[in-house]
Image (cartoon, helix red, strand yellow):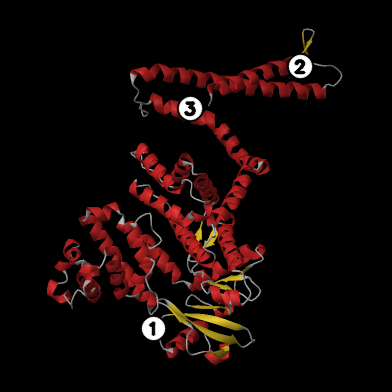
Amino acid sequence: MGRRFRHLHRYREIASAFVRYGFGYLVKDLGLAEVVPYRTFWNGQRKGVDKKSLGIRIRLFLEELGPTFVKLGQLAGSRSDLLPGHIVAELRSLQDDVPAFPFSEAARIVETELGDKLEVLFSEFEERPIAAASIGQVHLAVLSSGESVAVKVQRPNIRTIVETDLEILAELAAMAERRLEWAKRYRIREMADELGRALLAELDYGKERRNAEKFAVLGASIPYLHIPAVYSERSTGRILTMERVDGIKLSDKEALQAAGHSPAEIADRFVSIILHQVLFDGFFHADPHPGNALVLEDGRIALLDFGMVGKLSTTMKLYFSSLVIALRGQSTEGVIRAISRLGLIPDNIDQSSLHADVDELRELYYGVPLSQISLGDSIRRLMDVARKHDIRIPSEMTLLGKALLTTEGVASGLDPSFSILKVAEPFGRRLLKYKVNPVRAIKRAGTKLPEIADWLWDAPGKLKELMTLAKQGKIKLELTVPETEAFMKKLDRIGNRLSISIVLLAFSILMVGLIVGSSINSESSITIGRFPAIEIGFAVAGTMLLWLLYSIFRSGR
């Protein structure tokens, strides 16, 4: 309640927008009418929204409320696992073009952030920005040392505006989940928190600078990739100075051909760059639209704008490669297995229904030429299936789906016959070969040995603690009568194996003592009667070990 009164004016603007775009019922449902009287937010006509679809009305609503809501809408456009497809499509078309703020403000921010006069910091600084967006704008400049650069300057007070809107949005999401069943089902509060964190990360130009530097290091092995250099001494959390890059946009096919570039080859290079980042680096450009990539004169592709990046762990990379191969082979079981590993499947899921939905998806692509199969669209449809069955997919995977869909759209614009799935499959197979590489498996096993040794060392103590708790009645087991006999048999087998293991360990220690004693007294061997003790000991120990291994393997566990 305190937040609502503190930002009463902004709440009135939001409530008015709700009414104008056909969402007036939410004002009452969310309890806003208690704070903002109905007559105060009825401002103007509904602009004929009755004839517009739900997705269009949501897009117009967000555009009217300004930078924070536009950016949140764009970020939400990547969450096809949480939102219906027709809404996601509209959110992806949200416009981020806003008027530039005055040069005097830009100069003031640059001088405040970098601590010196503009003419000292730069020998040239163009007043008119070459691009303006909701968070900042870009000016071309020249350093005093002669390098041509592009300077991104954050909008004045944008952080305060964003933080205020996010505070209001969090309050609205909490109210929605308390009052509306559909809001709870779609996890509105969780979505708002996640999108808010992503937006605040974009406000930190220092983070974008570090992302660019990391891309430069990871992409050094790709000959046709160029990452613009960052000038750290001319960058802060609100200022980002990077190497100026001149080239042709990927969307300008005619210009590429006129410059002597093959659109098909450029498409292949662009897709290979993104797939390399996804499947090998695990650190990828999450917004690879045509405006964020330029083709240089020598044919290299320069990536720009590193505010939105995605990260995949080694495990996630392997599971995604399995998904790509399963999609390529149209394997229902393989797709379900990959989804189960990528997401959190609820205990009460209807497996037969899930299997039927994936089968239906597979039928869409059965017999279809590889060149006509869209990897991005396949993943989007899988996200729809996941949402239907309440399978929670990590946000990294949904961000990846958006990036691949964008990448595929760019490649198709350059070469209509291009197949991203055909390019992606070899990457996936290389990753799986890496997974099953015996040398790597041995190394991984070696790193686990200390942990296994610690567990074996602690096992007797833990077993003693368990038995003590059982005697004290602090451990309760609920077993049905038919299960009791089977359980006791298994317990007996475990006890027998543990006893054999302990005896074998003790016997081994005794044998070590005999060997050491024999080595000290090398003149005579240790015997039992007329038989050599050490050889007998080895035979007994070997027999016990073979029996133990046989019983373990025979149990299948």
Instruction: Tell us which disc is closer to us: 2 or 1.
Output: 1
The residue pinned by badge 3 equals 464
SS for dot 2: helix
Q: CA distance from mark 1 to mark 3?
A: 72 Å
Please name the amino acid that badge 3 sits on. Answer: Lys
Q: Residues within 10 Å of mark 3 (few under 14, many from 20)?
A: few
Q: Which percent across, then down, holds residue 478?
A: 34, 25
Among the two numbered marks 3 and 2 on one chain, the one whose residue lies closer to the N terminus: 3
Which residue is situated farthest in the right direction here? Answer: 523
The residue pinned by badge 1 equals 99
Residue 230 at least partly seen: no
Q: Which percent across, then down, holds residue 457?
A: 58, 32
Among the two numbered marks 1 and 3 on one chain, the one whose residue lies closer to the N terminus: 1
Please name the amino acid that badge 2 sits on. Answer: Glu
The residue pinned by badge 2 equals 535
> In the picture, residue 141 is in which quadrant?
bottom right
Point 66% across, 62% down: residue: 221
Q: Which percent across, then down, holds residue 125?
A: 53, 89
Among the two numbered marks 2 and 1 on one chain, the one whose residue lies closer to the N terminus: 1
Give the camera-side residue of 546 and 262: 262
The image shows residue 545, relative to residue 71, as above or below, that is above
What quarter of the picture does the N terminus occupy?
bottom left
Give the camera-side residue of 465 and 157: 157
Please name the amino acid that badge 1 sits on. Answer: Pro
The image shows residue 400, relative to residue 552, as above or below, that is below
Q: Which percent across, then down, holds residue 149?
A: 58, 82
SS for dot 1: loop
Q: Residues within 10 Å of mark 1 (few under 14, many from 20)?
A: few
